[in-house]
Image (tube, grey):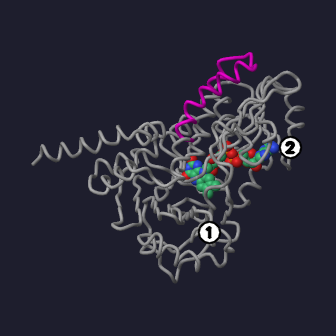
Amino acid sequence: MAGIGIVGAGISGLTLALRLQQLGVETTLYCESDAESVRKGRLPNTVGRSGHTAARERELGSEHFRDPGSLLGYATLSIAGDPPVEFTGSFGEPFHVADFRLLLPAFMDDFAVRGGEIVVTGTAPDAAQVERWSRGHELMVVASGRRSLTELFPRDPGRSPYDRPQRLVTAALCRGFASETLFRYNISGGAGEIFRAPIVTREGVVSAVLVEAVPGGPLEPIYRTPWDELPAALLPAFREHAPRLAELVEPAEFEMLGPDDLLQGAITPMVRRPVAQLPDGKIALAIGDAWITNDPITGQGANLGSRCAWIAAEAIAAGGPYDAAFGRTTAERMWEAGAPVTDWTNAFLRPPAVHVMSLLMTAGTRQDVADLVVSLFSDPAHAWGLLSSPEEVARIIDDEERRAYDRV
Ligand SMILES: Cc1cc2nc3c(=O)[nH]c(=O)nc-3n(C[C@H](O)[C@H](O)[C@H](O)COP(=O)(O)OP(=O)(O)OC[C@H]3O[C@@H](n4cnc5c(N)ncnc54)[C@H](O)[C@@H]3O)c2cc1C
């Protein structure tokens, strides 16, 4: 065994493994579960992958499950209030929503069929095991998600403004919505956010519902509701906090797929220190949620994991030594991608700033601003560059006003 050891077969670890394989770098992938167990497991998330992530998968020759019903070209954003604000805009390149219990095993199969070495551990190995594996590799990359091996990568307080969950998350797969290929994003101030998207699953295209409840707010009980009582709890929540979504539901047909098609949890947003010094003098590099765990509110974690895997693969393929300086430089390059996503997502967990609200209200009356706002979800660097700047937002709104004036 030599080359690179990767711990974790989520989208981050698998993208890295497939890219290194493509670049001719010897790689071993350590997984907690085999592909079949992932297929039969519980719903891990309801990820929408951007056009950029899809382009990387295309370059890897690993495009899967692109059922047209799960490709979303547009999103409708509805903000409850008096008056309510609503607009529909284009993502540019479509988002693709696939059940990760389909997608990740397909990536694992691709890696294995192309000669990749997969070691299935059956349990989640600890830091001591990573240190033992490290002896057989030039570099260990840890992509084990937000829950494990955290002792290797302590929290970075300077980049982590929260010390507790800002939302209580319920993700569920359901039937009973009118069919449409739109992403629905509903914001209800003080209560939270409710999303609905079509998702391709082993049972075909169904609906993914994500409720992001503000702790202590009126949506919090959803997070404690058992799966078989969820439809009855969701309907009144939709009517009150996402009325346009409620209009799409056929109450008699509204049901959960099954008990495993539900995820309830609370995520503390956190950035960790990405480089661990191991006792044998080598380093371990964290990527994906093992490094940056953001709240799903902006739908960016998997997209960032894929992007950072790509950056790390390019750096690794350029050659060693894979020492502390390599770790620092690679982490800095990844942070250029990670910082805007993190800052934007953390800002979204707070009530919108006045200039952001003005932009959203303008989007409610101007299609080009609506398209601009929705396209920001595909381009987090642009999103944060714009949304963090009252001057930039004013320039866009003023420009619109001036153009409208010129047309008169
Ligand atoms: C409800 C919900 C909705 C979301 N929506 C979006 C979205 O729309 N868009 C988006 O981009 N992101 C979204 N996210 C975030 C996204 O799911 C994560 O950011 C992304 O999946 C993280 O991928 P990862 O590979 O870094 O980690 P993980 O997916 O956590 O994968 C880690 C893997 O490592 C394995 N593992 C753990 N410990 C060990 C160990 N010690 N040894 C070996 N293996 C180990 C685990 O079993 C797992 O397979 C959402 C998340 C949630 C919860």
- Vertical order, 72 against 379 (above or below): below
Residue under circle 2?
125
Q: Is mark 2 within 8 Å of ligand 1?
A: yes
**Furthest residue in direction left, as rendered:** 408
Residue closer to the observer: 26 or 346: 346
Side of 71 where 406 appears, left or right: left
Q: Residue at x 78, y 35 (%)?
A: 117
Q: Is mark 1 within 8 Å of ligand 1?
A: no
Q: Position of residue 291 (x, y in %)?
A: 69, 38
Boundaries of the magenta span: 313-342
Q: How many marks?
A: 2
CA gap between label 2 and label 1 equals 34 Å
Query: Which amino acid does the dot numbered 1 rest on?
Result: Glu
- Vertical order, 12 against 68 (above or below): above
Residue closer to the observer: 147 or 241: 241
Q: Position of residue 367 (x, y in %)?
A: 28, 52
Q: Position of residue 107 (x, y in %)?
A: 66, 44
Disc 2 + disc 1, Cβ < 8 Å? no
Residue under circle 1?
220
Which quadrant does the N terminus fall into?
top right
Q: Magenta segment: does it hold 315? A: yes
Q: Residue at x 66, y 34 (%)?
A: 16
**Residue 64 seen in the figure:** no
Residue closer to the observer: 258 or 130: 130
Q: Position of residue 315 (x, y in %)?
A: 64, 23
- Vertical order, 25 against 305 (above or below): above
Residue closer to the observer: 67 or 303: 303
Query: Which amino acid does the dot numbered 2 rest on?
Result: Pro
